[in-house]
Image (tube, rainbow, N blue to C red):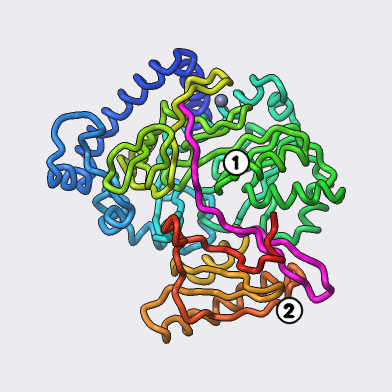
Amino acid sequence: MPFDAWTTLSRVGEIAWTRSGGRRAVDAAAAARGERLIAYARAHSPYYRDWWRAHGAVGAGLAALAPVTKRSLMDRFDDWVTDRQLRRSGVEAFLADRANIGEFYLGRYAIWKSSGSSGEPGIFVQDRGALATYDALLSAQLTSAAIAGRYVASLVMQGGRAALVAATGDHFASIASWERVCRGTPWPNARAFSVMEPMPALVAQLNAYRPAFLASYPTTLAMLAAEKRAGRLQITPSCIWSGGEYLADATRRAIERAFGAMLVNEYGASECMSIAFTCGRGALHVNADWVIVEPVDRDFRPTPPGERSHTVLLTNLANYVQPIIRYDLGDSVTAVAEPCACGSPLPVIRVEGRRDDVLSLRAGDGRLVQLAPLALTTVLEDALASRRFQLVQTGPSRIVVRLAAHDPRERSEAWPAARRALHAYLAQQGLGDVELYLDSIAPMPDAHSGKLREVLTTNPEAAAS
Ligand SMILES: [Zn+2]
C-alpha cells in the first residue's frame, strides 16, 4: 500500500522535526492536534456532542471537557464512531469471522478487541492515519535506540532478520505494528512466530531463524531469556522490543542481561497503540506530540508529579474514526518532574500496569513447563467469546478457572468449552495431566488496584520470576 507507506514515512519525518524543537514544540503540536480532534468529534460524533453538551463543556481546551468511560462509550458505540457506515452489529460480525484477522473492515479500518485492565470488553476501530502514526512512532523508538549509539537499527533495514513472537490467531492490538511490518514489504526478512507454540519448538524455530531483532510480550521475553541463560536458545539479537503487557523494571534488566542487548519497551493499549516507550536509560517517555496522558485522582483531578495517580485520562490525537478524548484508561501512573538524562524532550512517566503471572506447571514426567499468560488468555478468550474469566494456578499441576456469569447454571454451561480448549492447549505443552476445576465464584479484581488480573498463581513454589 504505497499511500500508507508514504503517510508513515512523512509522519516519521514530522515526529523527528517536532521533537528536535524541544518540549515547547512538542506541546504546541499536541495542543493544535487536540483542538482539531475536539472540533472533529463535536461535528461527527453524536456521543461526544451530547456528552459535552450535557456536562456543560464550553469553549476549547481539553481540561474543560468531561472525562468518558469505556462502558458509556461502548453502550453507544454507533454514536461514538464518526463514520456513519460503522455499526456495532457489523463490526461484531466481522470480528466473529477468524478469516478476517489482519483484514481491514470496510476496506479501511483495523478492528481490535480487548478486555483491557478493567475486564470490560471493548471494540476499537483505527483509521489509516492512526495506523500510520503508530508505525511511525515505532520507527521513532527504534531510531532513538540507534541514536543512543549502542545498537544499530540499520542492521534491520539492511536485511537483518526480525522475529515477532505473538498471539497470531486473533483480533488483538498487541504488537499490531509489528504484524504489519512482518506482512508488508519494508522489511522483507521479518517473520511471525506463535506464542502458543510449546517452548522447545519455539526455541528450535528461533535458533534456526537467528533474528537480529526480537519482538514480543514482556512475559514471553522473560521466558526466552531463561532459555537463553540455560543455553538452549542460541540467538544473539542486537535489539529487543517488547509491548502489549506491563513490563517491570527488574524483568527488563533480566532480559537485557540475558541477551546482552538493549530492550525498547512500548507502553500501549488498544485505545492507543503507542502511548510511551523506554529510552536507553530505561525511562518511559510519553509520545506527547501524539497522545495526552493526564494522571488524575478518583475525582479526575490532576495528580501532582511524584504521586501515584488513581487512573489516567488518555487522549489519542491520531485516531479520528473513534475518538478517545479524556478517556478513563484505568492505569495508575506517576509523572516524573525531572528531565531524563537521555536528553529527550518527551515527558517521563512510571506505570503500574496489570501484572499477569507466568505459570510454571509440573508435567507428567516431572519437568516444569512455563506458560505465558498471553497464550492462556488467548485460548480462553477464544473459547468464551467476551465472557470475563480468571485463571488461578493453585498447585503444581492444578488450575482453577473463574467465570463471570449471572447464575451458577450459566457458569456451568460455559465451562465445558473453556475446559476443552484449555485442556487441548495444555496437552500440546506436555501438560495433559494438569487438573482443571471450575470455581464457584466470579473473577475477583485485585484488592489493591481494583483491576482484574486474568492469570495468576497462588502456588508459591511454582511462581516464576
Ligand atoms: Zn530518557
- The answer to whether residue 369 is above or below residue 418 is above
Q: Which residue is mark 1?
A: 178
Task: Let me know if residue 108 appears in the view.
Answer: no
Upstream in sequence: badge 1 or badge 2: 1
Amino acid type at image mark 2: Asp
Picture quadrant of ligand 1: top right
Residue 190 spot, x, y in % from top left? 69, 40
User: What segment is highlighted magenta in the picture?
Assistant: 347-373
Q: Residues within 10 Å of mark 1 (few under 14, many from 20)?
A: many
Residue 48 spot, x, y in % from top left? 22, 44
Q: Which residue is mark 2?
A: 433
Residue 355 lies in the magenta stretch:
yes
Residue 256 lies in the magenta stretch:
no
CA distance for labels 1 and 2: 35 Å
Residue 389 spot, x, y in % from top left? 49, 69
Between 406 and 160, the one lying in front of the other is 406
Residue 460 spot, x, y in % from top left? 67, 65
